[in-house]
Image (cartoon, rainbow, N blue to C red):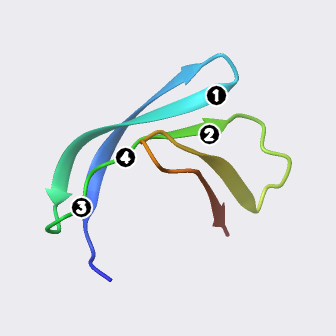
């Protein structure tokens, strides 16, 4: 697995936080930046679920 990183810009729209890709910090070959949509008020404080806003992508879950 390759490793990379990029900056995101966030804004709140209604009850959702929208993260949009900004610029690469370290870009691995063959990878693209993607954005995310995360609902506010997650029911589980140890878990964040959201949608990836790129074609052919689905959802994600981050766990503490």
> What secondary structure is found at the residue carrying circle 4?
loop
**Helix, strand or loop status at disc 3:** loop
Q: Is residue 42 above or below residue 40?
A: below
Tell me if label 4 and label 1 are in contact, CB under 8 Å.
Answer: no
Residue 22, by quadrant, is top left
Give the answer, above or below, for where 1 lies relative to 25. Answer: below
Q: Earlier in the sequence, mark 1 or mark 2?
A: 1
Pointer 4: what residue? 34
Determine which residue is flagged by label 3.
31
Q: Residue at x 78, y 44 (%)?
A: 42
Pointers 2 and 4 in contact (C-beta within 8 Å): no
Q: Which mark is residue 38?
A: 2
Q: Distance from label 3 to label 2 (Cα)? A: 22 Å
Using the numbered discs, state the Cα–Cα distance from disc 4 to disc 1 in whole angstroms: 17 Å
In the foreground, 50 or 64? 50
Tag 1 and tag 2, C-beta contact below 8 Å: yes
- The label nearer to you, 4 versus 1, is 4
* For residue 61, side relative to residue 26 (left or right): right
Q: CA distance from mark 1 to mark 2?
A: 6 Å
Q: Which residue is mark 1?
A: 16
Q: Secondary structure at mark 1?
A: strand
Of labels 3 and 2, earlier in sequence is 3
Comparing labels 2 and 4, the label whose residue is closer to the camera: 4
Q: Tell me which residue sits at (79%, 55%) in the image.
A: 45
Percent of width and height locating residue 33: 29, 49
Quadrant containing the N terminus is: bottom left
Q: Which one is in front, 10 or 3?
A: 3
Q: What residue is drawn where x is 76% and y is 63%?
A: 46
């Amino acid at each position: 697995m390759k490793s990379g990183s990029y900056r995101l810009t966030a804004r709140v729209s209604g009850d959702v936080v929208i993260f949009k890709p900004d610029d690469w910090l370290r870009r691995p070959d063959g990878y693209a930046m993607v954005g995310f949509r995360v609902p506010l008020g997650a029911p589980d404080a140890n878990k964040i679920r959201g949608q990836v806003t790129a074609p052919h992508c689905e959802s994600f879950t981050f766990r503490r």
